[in-house]
Amino acid sequence: MRKDLLDQILDSPQLPTLPRIAVRVIELCKQDGGDLDELVEVISVDPGLVVKLLASVNSSYYGLSRQVVTVREATKLLGVRAVKTLTIAFCLSQVISEQCPIDFDLDGFWRRCVYSAVAAKTIAENLGSELTEEAFTAALLQDIGLVAMVQVIGRDYQELIKSTGSTHSVLARIEQNQLSTDHAEVGAGLARQWGLPDMLVYAIEHHHAPDYAPAEYLVLVKMVAASSLVADALSPQQLSISAVSSYAAQLEEWMGMDEQMAHDLLAEVEEKSKLISDAFKIKSRGHRDVNRLLLEANEKLIATTLENERTIDQLDKDRSRLESISQHDSLTNLANRRVFDRALKTAFENSQQGDFPLSLVLFDIDHFKKINDEHGHLAGDRVLVMIANLLKEHEPEDGCVARFGGEEFTLLLPRLGVASAAQIGEHMRERIEKMRFDVGDGKRIGVTVSAGVAGRDHLRQLGNEIELLDCADKALYAAKRSGRNCIRVLRPMSVPHESVDQQ
């Protein structure tokens, strides 16, 4: 498909054709050196071309010290190569202006071309290259394929251009995806038909992929490719800091220019392009202070970055809060049942692997329903919170205090045998019994708890954490059967039978 469409475009009679003067100038470009007399003779036969050439030469862009009134004088002062470049440029601008559809943004197209041409020449000058005029011409013509595709494909292609904004590298990718060719390939094919020198053909063909250019033309192609990035950065009404950053990075990689030099180049190209735009009859876009726009764009980027950082920080806080909510009981702020189950499983596995004891104390508030019924649920909540805070004081570093559910709490004690765990449990039971709990309206009540203790060590073997929890629960049930406000220990031996000891 690619070859069919490419051939269809290049064979179309709608393509722009070069006037005889441009053809002759191109022939002169291929000759070594430059015949001043012949060039002056070729240009002088077209009065309109002479007027454009002299107006351009006398513009501030070239900064000549005196007014030039003849083509010969202009050619002597600027050089044959520069005059050839301008002649080709003006011939093409006339042809394209006459043959493009009336709804095509010709002004925007030529503004981009001028930005690119001035940028390429300025880059060449900064690098001390002898290819300044060739860089100008190649950059000016690099998007000529775009015009050819507009003329042959029509409105559908214009819509494709609009969909990409001002970034031509995006345009090239979309063209390849949808058309299996792009404006760089079409432009190179058109340049070959016109008989342009190979260096210009390859610069047009590879200005979006300079690494694929022949080695002998690589320097020129990269200057043209960089000029396209300059045009990307300068084309919008407001500079895009992302486009500028991309351009600056490429300029450093290809040309060794640092970021400040890249920014200075943008300002220089903006000013120089204004000086030569009149010659191409490009409407003025008004004064733009590129340095100020870059500063504003950078300030916006910093502000956006700070806002993003604040947003990220808030998201981190929200995530932490949600994680905390998912892991903690909302009333007591103790670990919830899900966290306790994981902690119990891990602690049991560690106890088995390390062959050290593990104990579990299960507490239950006695007659808690009566507290809610007589004093209200808020009073019950206060009791739960106060007991939770007390238990939290005895949470070991690798253990876990959790709200097991309702009015039940757990105390997981790694590396402690059941005797030590029972002592801690009894100590907590006694402290709770002596406390008076504020339930509101100046009322203070007494509360008691029952507790069950179980554990594993080398004498008390259990198969898994579920068996340990079951033993603690049975011990707690034994405490309740014994009249509550007491603690009981279940001592499972290696043989699976049960005995409940009273403390």
Image (cartoon, rainbow, N blue to C red):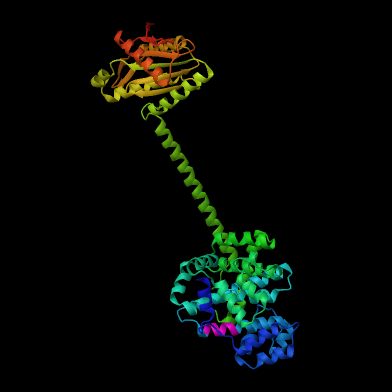
| Total numbered badges shown on the rendered structure | 0
Magenta residue check for 96:
yes
Residue 293 image-quadrant placement: bottom right
Image coordinates of residue 390 in percent, x first then y, are 41, 19
Q: 97 or 274, which is in the foreground? A: 97
Q: Is residue 364 visible to us here?
A: yes
User: Taking 107 as reference, is 392 above or below it?
Assistant: above
**Outermost residue, right side:** 33
In the picture, measured across the screen, residue 272 lies left or right of residue 307, that is: right
Q: Which residues are magenta?
A: 91-97
Q: Which image quadrant is residue 281 in?
A: bottom right
Q: Quadrant of residue 270?
A: bottom right
State the residue at coordinates (52%, 20%): 353
109 or 341: nearer the eye?
A: 341
Residue furthest toward the left? 373
**For the C terminus, which image quadrant?**
top left
Q: Residue at the location (43% across, 16% down)?
A: 462
Q: Is residue 110 above or below residue 24?
A: above
Outermost residue, bottom direction? 45
